[in-house]
Image (tube, grey):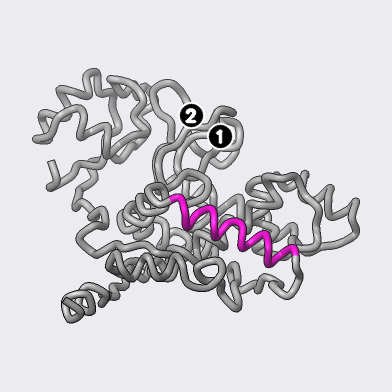
């Protein structure tokens, strides 16, 4: 019996898209949850190479809060880890292309849980753009097409914003904070309080937690076993091979179009959530790329 329990307590380590995924037995998970103080607390953390000053009491406690909350949102955090296997490979090369640190993929995590979320204020998509901001960054937003739901285009728009914020503040951490608090809002706090470091600023409740939530999800997703998550490679949501078809004319019936591609309307909309109607009106002959899955349906 002891031999079997020992075998069950072993774990497998798999590196998937920058996430260390550990499969841990129930016994091991229970041990992790009950030994020590707050499960596990890192000795050092950083965002985009900028180290958080954990020697400051309130900084350490704010990170501890977010680690505890997210480590105990079992289903929510597990689903995020599973989705990341599919979503991160799309986000990562775009961040790299624009010279934005890879850590900003965790900003997308806390914004939307890597889903096409809709907020009460009207922000939409993985990167949670408001309509006016999306249009300012070059995205089309209307009742027919809403490119906030296009992961590639919205990631590019997010990169443009973050680069502008970094140029303004000189800090990636403040750039991340401004994604929540706005450049003018964060800039005003810096001017009023005469400090230029995120960790020294007194901000609104949401913005003061924002970077700590990013740090917590980064820490948990890179070290899931430390926080009691048992996720094996087979549990991760797989990337689905696909092709892209360029269209520059109106499609009057997307259900009929889907059938010509060997799929149905539901599958078409799953892979192209930016298509917001049952048709695609294109009087200007704009070029759109429609994704067609090659398997998984």
Query: Seen in the image, is 242 located left or right of residue 126?
Result: left
Horizontal and vertical percent for residue 176?
63, 56
Callout 2: SS:
loop
Do tag 1 and tag 2 residues touch (Cβ < 8 Å)?
A: yes
Which residues fall within the magenta stretch? 58-73
Q: Is residue 111 above or below residue 172?
A: above
Q: Residue at x 24, y 55 (%)?
A: 239
Residue sitting at x 63%, y 62%: 63
Q: Which mark is residue 135?
A: 1
What residue would you read off at disc 2?
A: 141
Magenta stretch encompasses residue 67: yes
Comparing 200 with 155, the one in front is 200
Task: Decide which of 65, 54 is in the foreground and name it.
Answer: 65
Specify whether 214 is left or right of 274. Answer: right
Question: Residue 235 location in percent, x, y?
Answer: 24, 57
From the viewer's perspective, is residue 269 above or below residue 37?
Answer: above
Q: Residue furthest front?
A: 1
- Label 1 or label 2, whichever comes before in sequence order: 1
Mark 1 and mark 2: Cα distance apart in space: 7 Å
Residue nearest the observer in this picture, 30 or 15: 30
- Looking at the rendered structure, the number of numbered marks drawn on it comes to 2
Position of 16 with respect to 148 (left or right) is left
Q: Please identify the quarter of the rendering in which residue 90 is found.
A: bottom left
Q: Is residue 209 left or right of residue 124?
A: right
Query: What residue is drawn where x is 45% and y is 43%?
Result: 126
């Amino acid at each position: 019996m002891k031999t079997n329990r020992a075998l069950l307590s072993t774990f497998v380590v798999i590196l998937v898209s920058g996430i260390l995924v550990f499969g841990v037995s129930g016994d091991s998970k229970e041990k992790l949850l009950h030994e020590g103080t707050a499960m596990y607390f890192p000795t050092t953390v950083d965002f985009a190479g900028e180290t958080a000053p954990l020697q400051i009491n309130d900084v350490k406690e704010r990170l501890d809060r977010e680690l505890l909350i997210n480590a105990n949102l079992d289903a929510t955090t597990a689903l995020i880890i599973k989705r990341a296997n599919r979503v991160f490979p799309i986000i990562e090369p775009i961040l790299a292309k624009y010279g934005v640190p890879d850590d900003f993929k965790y900003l997308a995590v806390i914004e939307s849980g890597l889903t096409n979320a809709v907020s009460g204020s009207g922000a939409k998509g993985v990167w949670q753009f408001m309509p006016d901001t999306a249009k300012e960054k070059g995205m089309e937003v209307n009742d027919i097409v809403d490119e906030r739901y296009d992961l590639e285009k919205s990631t590019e728009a997010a990169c443009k914003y973050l680069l502008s914020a970094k140029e303004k503040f000189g800090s990636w951490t403040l750039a991340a904070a401004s994604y929540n608090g706005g450049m003018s809002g964060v800039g005003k706090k810096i001017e009023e309080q005469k400090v230029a470091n995120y960790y020294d600023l007194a901000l609104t409740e949401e913005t003061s937690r924002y970077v700590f939530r990013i740090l917590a999800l980064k820490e948990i997703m890179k070290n899931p076993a430390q926080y009691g998550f048992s996720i094996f490679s087979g549990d991760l949501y797989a990337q689905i091979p696909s092709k892209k078809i360029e269209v520059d004319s109106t499609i009057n019936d997307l259900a009929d179009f889907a059938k010509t591609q060997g799929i149905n309307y539901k599958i078409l909309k799953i892979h192209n959530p930016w298509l917001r109607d049952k048709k695609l009106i294109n009087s200007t002959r704009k070029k759109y790329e429609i994704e067609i899955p090659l398997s998984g349906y």
